[in-house]
Image (spheres, helix red, strand yellow):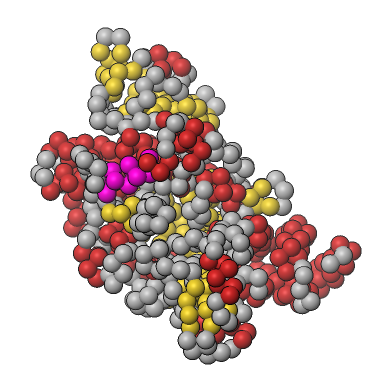
Amino acid sequence: MDPKDDQRFLASLLNTLKMKRGNAEFCSRLGNRFSTLRSLFFRLYGHRNDFLYWYTELIRILHRSYLKRSPELKIIDRAREMNPGWLLNEGLVSYTLYVDRFAGNLVGLCSKIPYFKELGANLIHLMPLLRCPPMDNDGGYAVSDYRAVQSSLGTMQDLRSFSSHLRKNQRLLQLDLVVNHTSDQHEWARRARKGEREYQDMYFTFDGRSNPDRFEESLPEVFPLSAPGNFTYISQIDKWVMTVFHNYQWDLNYTNPRVFLEMLQNLFFLADQGADVLRLDAIPYLWKRIGTNSRNQAEAHWICQLFHACIRVVCPGVSLVAEAVVEPREVVRYFGERESAGAECDMAYHVLYMVLLWDALATGKNSVFLRSLSSLPKLPANVTWLTYLRCHDDIGLGYDDADLRGLGIDPALHRRFIVDFYSGRYPGSYASGRIFMENSRTGDARISGTAASLVGLEKAILANDTGAVHDSVHRLLLLYGLVMSFGGLPVVYAGDEVGYCNDYSQLENNKEQEDNRWIHRPEIDWDKISRRNLSGTIEERIYRGMKNMITVRKATKEFSFHAHRRFIDAGDPHVLCFVRSFHEQRTMVLANLSNSSRKIDPLILYWGGLTGKIQDRLGSHPLCREGEVYVLPPYGLYWLARV
Ligand code: GLC
């Protein structure tokens, strides 16, 4: 489209809209983003004869969705528009849970708000809760209706009521938007199976194996054991459908503009239920191209940019989280280029940091950690990481191989060591995880297990070994302490705050035995949670430590994402040390990654800019001076600051 036509189109559109009252805000936001919207939409769909039709449709949808947004949410939108860095502050802590496993249903969940308050969690992430088939649903990631809540969890009205309760209690809501695929039970898939061409075009459907075979040459498998191959034969229509995840998760075809517009409306719909943050599931997969691995394609980024720009017009208070489990440098690209028109997501899971925490614990050393982080590109302004230790998924060892090689480490051997260590196969390992999706062809393997089981609590309890329990509690708090202080919005995975171990009974119910991710999705038992109040129990020790860290984090300006971070060489490969600073305030994070006491030169405080009388803001271990050195106990963690 000629830019002049573009301007004429905008002018006539704005004139029509302006005639109606209450449109000034929409017109001004649309005016600001118009050229971005046009150029992105044109890049994706400009080659089509019906481009103008779809483009007009896009603008209509934006306008309609803006008008539909409630006055209450519009007030929040305006406040956040004025304060684009609102997610970066030290006061936010996220908590991820499954509604059914945590509280039965949404009504029950409302009664748990006091618990979130007590712990200090204020961004509540509900795992997928939209309607999906009872069996083949990949933990809710195979949605059959984006406008209905799974009936066992409640209704859309219950969801709105929960989000409104959260708002009244100054808490935020995060929901998932499964953008890459639908369940094969979604209406579009049903109609596609009935032979309706229009709906077959919402997915990748092929006659014969020719194109599927060409794709397969370079498409990796996500679930090689439970879902080998990337295409599923649908006998009713004698066609092959692309199914990159499970065979019941049909990949959406974003080359069709209708798919984008439908998903955009689903996004606005969830935003209108009161979601403050939307997690875009599996976004690297959004665009497929023969001859590539169909991940991180340029078009996938344009789609994210388009989602972002549309949100800025309709509901700018809503933020996007990238769930991009890809190479570290590729993850960073999902933030987009903020200064130009290319903004994408406002947050992304810091997959690399998560892996590095587990690496540092298994090796007891800081080298891979420091090297890998130093080669990560800088982030643009006003975006932040979600820092986390565990989530509902497996742990995939997505280091950059070049970083490992740079340290003289063989990447394959190193990964093998980490997998053996956390699965407990490595001699003397304290961990009791499970290997997930071991691929004998590629050698790839991932790890399942709760944080507590991976740090040794499960084995320690079984062995009734008080010393081992003590160590595992400290390992868990050490890792969570690094999650809370590094910079980013920390996530607590439900159950970790009281040390939930693996739940193997989940495997018995699970027809896909290979999907052992279920062992770390435990059902929360509130009797166990109530043991947090019983002095001396394991639950109480972990909970007290976690709650303390959350409280201190929130009172520490230098833990905000804006604040500066500088690594300090403590002269010992087993010790990790960095200083966070904000104006004159400084906190030094000092961590002993190993199982032995470490001696540290007191000058380290001076190098970190800390002088005068120093205190440990966590107060968990005294900082002991023995003659000329400080002695850090095994797995000791300190947040040191001037008194
Ligand atoms: C994401 C989810 C994961 C799911 C996959 C397919 O990676 O986190 O649990 O299996 O997407 O939807």
Predominant secondary structure, magenta span: helix
Asked whether residue 372 is in view, the answer is yes
Left or right: 24 as drawn, with respect to 194: right
Depicted 638 relative to depicted 249: above or below: above
* Residue drawn at 47 percent across, 86 percent down: 235
Magenta-drawn stretch contains 278: no
Residue occupying the far left of the picture: 464
Residue 202 figure quarter: bottom right
**Magenta-highlighted residues:** 414-424
Q: Is residue 141 left or right of residue 600?
A: right
How far across and down, in percent of the image, does residue 523 sit? 26, 62
Q: Nearer the viewer, residue 342 or 546?
A: 342
Q: Position of residue 293 (x, y in %)?
A: 56, 59
Q: Is residue 83 above or below residue 588?
A: below
Work out which quarter of the rendered image holds the N terminus and state it: bottom right
Decide: is 35 above or below 428: below
Nearer to the camera, 223 or 548: 223
